[in-house]
Image: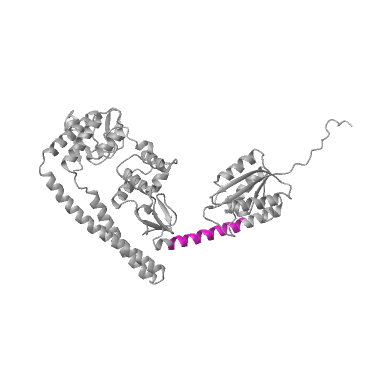
Amino acid sequence: MPRRRGQLAAVPDQPRRFVAYRRVSELMGRGGDDFHSPDIQLSAIRRMAKPAGLREVAVVDDIDRTGRNFSRDGIDRVRKMAAAGQVDVLAVYKVDRFGRNVLESLQMLAELANMGVTIMSATEQIDTSTPSGRWMLTNLLAIAEMQSDEIGRGWSNTIARRAERGQHHGRPLGYIRVNKRLIPDPVLGPAMTEVFRRYAIGDPIGEVTAYLAAIRGKAMHTANVKKLLRNPAYRGMVVTGDEVLPGEHDALVDEVTWRKVQNRLAAEAGTPPRHLAPTWPLVGLVECPQGHKLQRQGDRLVCGDGRGDVKGGTCPGVGRPILARVVDEVLRQVAEWAAELRTDHDARARRLARMTSSQADRATLERQLADARSAMVRLAKSHALERLPDDVYRQAMAELREAEQGAAGQLARLGSVEVPPDPVAAANAAEALLALWQDQDVTHAERVKALRSIVDRIVVRPAARWREPESDRVDVQFHW
């Protein structure tokens, strides 16, 4: 019998489509009966799905991801599939695999519900297509969030106890863990030391990042490298709360280099890497008499804080000297300085005297620093074994920390006053700089780096008379 117009045709029942979602906070190194591995989760989900008449369309994983938020690649994939109408059910092993944050979990649940997707649990018999299932889900999410908070509190206490014993939690890049102890990685350890050295001497952060990425064999971002440069673990310390304590592992960077790196990070904070790349040869070295860095405007230089150069400035400024003439005068003074070094017979005697004095002071301070840190480690171990009262521990630790910081500060100040180079070596470096400057293939970054090795600062003063030439207004101050 033919079907009349407007009569509905019979449509065979289609099984609901489901996505098996698996999440593990940390996969490596875990096991035991209480660990629900991705394979165990998937097996339980499929056992639930078969009698329920569900049809599997995908398996989505979030491995090594926390459930405290929903910024996860797997969840994003589920969203896209739901928006495209490719899934009806999100199946999980337990509700805490879906999320451990009540507010964000319910928001995500409402978003999926609006797209026709429900959630089913393999071990808790929850189906959010029913009112009772949604009520049970809310309660279980609250329990999961509470358990997550308890786990976090327990880990915080564990990390604090380890730090008091000088043990670092985790494994910073450049170290490996052997018998529960951090030791420098044979390859990445020296690489991290070189990263600190290069950044301390002024290499652009992009070049430092490219160097470390080449050693590791994988891409890296400059922000991640700056985070590594701020980690006190590389100077042999461990962090607990607001305290920085001596660690049992070896440092990969010395105190002088560490402080140079931190000072540069602080000075460049908030400045995009592309703005730090030199676009002219004296960038960062040339100043006004008040110490303000000069900036380039076209072919001239201006003071960034100068009233006469930039509207609203607070400094008298330097006028608008021509950059090319300032560069010529700097190179002339470099050549003159090199010639003087080769004829200065007293320079070597002065250098050797300063070197001897500096080495003696450094050895004393390094011994005081090592003694203070050793005492801090012993004190922390005694307190961890409950051999010292809390008030005695805090007072003694404060005194030792004050002694450690005092010795470290004096050592840093001593390191900032560098021993002058050998006169002949300094003259050779200056002449190499002059030869390098003439090479058209040399970049501004390479010129700045070479100039920083011998020049401390370049001061340009304002004109004292009408049209005073730049050659009379430039003063180059050398490291030696």
Which residue is pictured at 37% across the width and 44% down the height? 269
User: Relative to residue 375, is residue 81 drawn left or right?
Assistant: right
Q: As displayed, is residue 125 above or below residue 199?
A: below
Magenta segment boundaries in residue numbering = 141-161
Number of dots carrying numbers: 0
Q: How is the image coloured?
A: one colour
- Most distant residue in the right direction: 1
Name the image quarter holding the N terminus: top right
Q: As displayed, is residue 454 above or below residue 123?
A: above
Do we see residue 55 in this rendering?
yes
User: Relative to residue 204, is residue 52 drawn left or right?
Assistant: right
User: Residue 195 occupies which quadrant of the picture?
Assistant: top left
Do we see residue 271 in this rendering?
no
User: Relative to residue 416, is residue 135 drawn left or right?
Assistant: right
The image position of residue 325, as x and y in percent, is: 22, 29
| Foreground residue among 462 and 410 | 410
Q: As displayed, is residue 226 above or below residue 159?
A: above
The image position of residue 222, as x and y in percent, is: 41, 41
Q: Is residue 155 magenta?
A: yes
Q: Is residue 193 magenta?
A: no
User: Relative to residue 371, is residue 135 drawn left or right?
Assistant: right
The image position of residue 429, as x and y in percent, is: 21, 37
The image position of residue 90, as x and y in percent, is: 65, 47
Name the image quarter holding the C terminus: top left
User: Residue 467 occupies which quadrant of the picture?
Assistant: top left
Q: As displayed, is residue 73 above or below residue 142?
A: above
* Main SS class of the magenta portion in the image: helix
| Foreground residue among 150 and 65 | 65
Which residue is pictured at 27% across the width and 58% down the height? 406
